[in-house]
Amino acid sequence: MKKVIINGGNGRMGQAIARIIANQPQLDLEIVAVREEGQDVHTQADVVIDFSSVQGAQEAFTLARELKAACLIGTTNLPERFLFQMQEEHKIPLFYAPNVSLGVYFFGELLKQASRMYSGYERALHEIHHIHKKDAPSGTAKKLAEAIELPLKKVSYERFGETIGTHILTLSGPYEQIMLKHEALDRDLFAASAVHIAAWLVKQPAGFYTMQDYAQFILKSSKKKENNL
């Protein structure tokens, strides 16, 4: 069994990740520690999973390097200096994504294609999240906007109730309007994705990984299964 440290383990995402690991023994993962910002951990681990804060994410990265463990960081709104530091990583397998949902990644690819097809149309991106979310626009919205080269001034947001996460791209022409939407229906979407990515990450060589790398792995695996049918 691969040993897991959950950083930010008492948060909603941390608790969901712990529940999914416990319910999916086939992934060969077991939790050996639950850590919060500023806490010391005295145990070996194969992977550190972080959904916490900016400071917590930096601590998780440092801890993973000390343990020579893989590290998955899903914390959003990280400073550019830290992002550049992660991109240069070559001692451990390090994965970073502001949104770990494979569906959101493919949604971004869909938006790229739509932007090319409707190149002359006015574009705007709107995101909705729960009232507890601190960053605005969301890290996911920023990533989607970057993917389609949309200025941040074209990204709007709202905080409403307990909405998990909704992102809508609107393409407006002179006589019509096209809307593409991704809506997360359950927080376990992100927790389950994080756990599956962690199970994949511990098998990878040292280096920096993103959702593009994981998506390519999933697509190749699916193609192999189809060819074997």
Image (tube, rainbow, N blue to C red):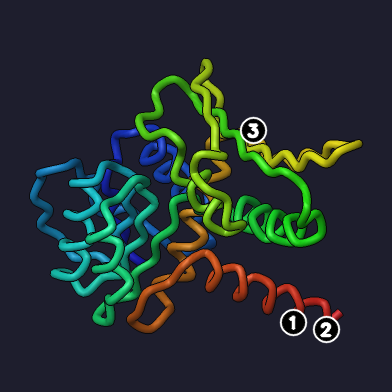
Q: Say what amino acid the circle numbered 3 marks.
A: Leu
Q: Secondary structure at mark 3?
A: loop
For residue 77, what is the image quadrant?
Answer: top left
How crowded pointer 1 is (Cα within 10 Å; few <14, some 14-19, many 20+) is rated as few
* Residue 42 percent location from the top left of the image: 10, 57
Give the Cα separation between the discs numbered 3 and 1.
30 Å
Q: Identify the residue shown where x is 83% and y is 83%.
A: 227
Residue at 22% from the left image edge and 56% from the top image edge? 60
209 or 175: which is nearer to us? 175
Residue at the (28%, 76%) spot, across then down: 88
Q: Which mark is residue 30?
A: none
Residue to which mark 3 is pinned: 185
Q: Secondary structure at mark 1?
A: helix
Asked if the residue under mark 1 is in contact with the one under mark 2, i.e. CB atoms within 8 Å, the reply is yes
Residue 227 is marked as 2
Mark closer to the chain start, 2 or 3: 3
**Element marked by disc 2:** helix
- Quadrant placement of the C terminus: bottom right
Quadrant in which residue 176 is drawn? top right
Q: What is the C-alpha distance between the residues marked 2 and 1?
A: 5 Å
Q: Earlier in the sequence, mark 3 or mark 1?
A: 3
83 versus 202 height, above or below: above
Instruction: From the image, tell me which residue sits under label 1.
Output: 224
Name the side, left or right, on which 56 lies relative to 3: left
Query: Is label 3 in contact with label 1 (beta carbons under 8 Å)?
Result: no
Q: Amino acid at mark 1?
A: Lys
